[in-house]
Amino acid sequence: MPRFRAHHTLLPLGLAFVLAACDEPASAPAQPAPPAAAATVALTEDAAARALAALAAAPIPAWAPQDRSLLREATVTSGPRWVAMTMPIPGATLYLEGNGDHFAAPEVDPATLPPVPTFAAPRVYENEAIWQADWVDEEGFAWTLHLECEDTVHDPRCQDGAAVTALQQSLRRVEATP
C-alpha cells in the first residue's frame, strides 16, 4: 500500500498561496516618511515623558534617573504598594523596584540587625554578576536598583559597585502631578 506523503500535497498548496499574494493589485504609493533622526527624537521624548507620567501616578512616591535618556525604552509597572521600572540601556539593563509593604519577623531582635541603608548610604553588593544598591527612603519605602551588564567580564560598569552607586545617587524624586 502506498504511503501518503503530506509534503507532496502541501507544497503545491503553499506555492499557490504565495503566487496569489504576488498577484494582488499594487497599493497606493506610500507617503514619504519623516527623517529618521527627527522621528527617533520625538519617540524618545514621548517615551521618557510616558515613563515619568507612569512613575508620577505610581501608588508610592517614586524615583527616576535624572538622565532622561535612560527612560527612552523604560517600562513601568505598579501594584497596590509597589512600583517597578525596567530600563534597557546600551549593553546593560537597569531595574528599579520600590516596595511599601513592611514585614516584621518577631523572632528577630532588631538590635542584632545591621543599620538600615539610606539613600545617601545604600547597601551596594554583587549578586550573580548583577550589581545592586538597596536603600530605604525617608518615607520608609524599600528600593533596589539593579545593574545587569550583557558582558560582565569586559564591561567596566560591572567590575565593581561604582557604576550602580553613581546611578543610584543620580536618581531624583518624581513629583506627582495634581
Image (tube, grey):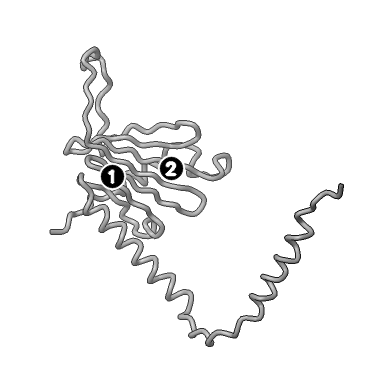
Quadrant where the C terminus is found in the figure: bottom left
Q: Is residue 156 left or right of residue 81?
A: right
Q: Secondary structure at mark 2?
A: strand
Q: Residue at x 24, y 35 (%)?
A: 136
Q: Nearer the viewer, mark 1 or mark 2?
A: 1
Residue type, mark 2 in image:
Leu
Find the distance from the CA under tag 1 to the CA under tag 2.
17 Å
Q: Earlier in the sequence, mark 1 or mark 2?
A: 1
- Farthest right residue? 1
User: Which is nearer the eye, 139 or 160?
Assistant: 139
Residue 69 in the image: above or below residue 103: below
x and y, in percent, of residue 90 in the image: 49, 54
Q: Residue at x 56, y 44 (%)?
A: 151
x and y, in percent, of residue 128 in the image: 49, 32
Q: Residue at x 33, y 44 (%)?
A: 168
Residue annotated with mark 1: 83
- Farthest left residue? 178
Residue annotated with mark 2: 147
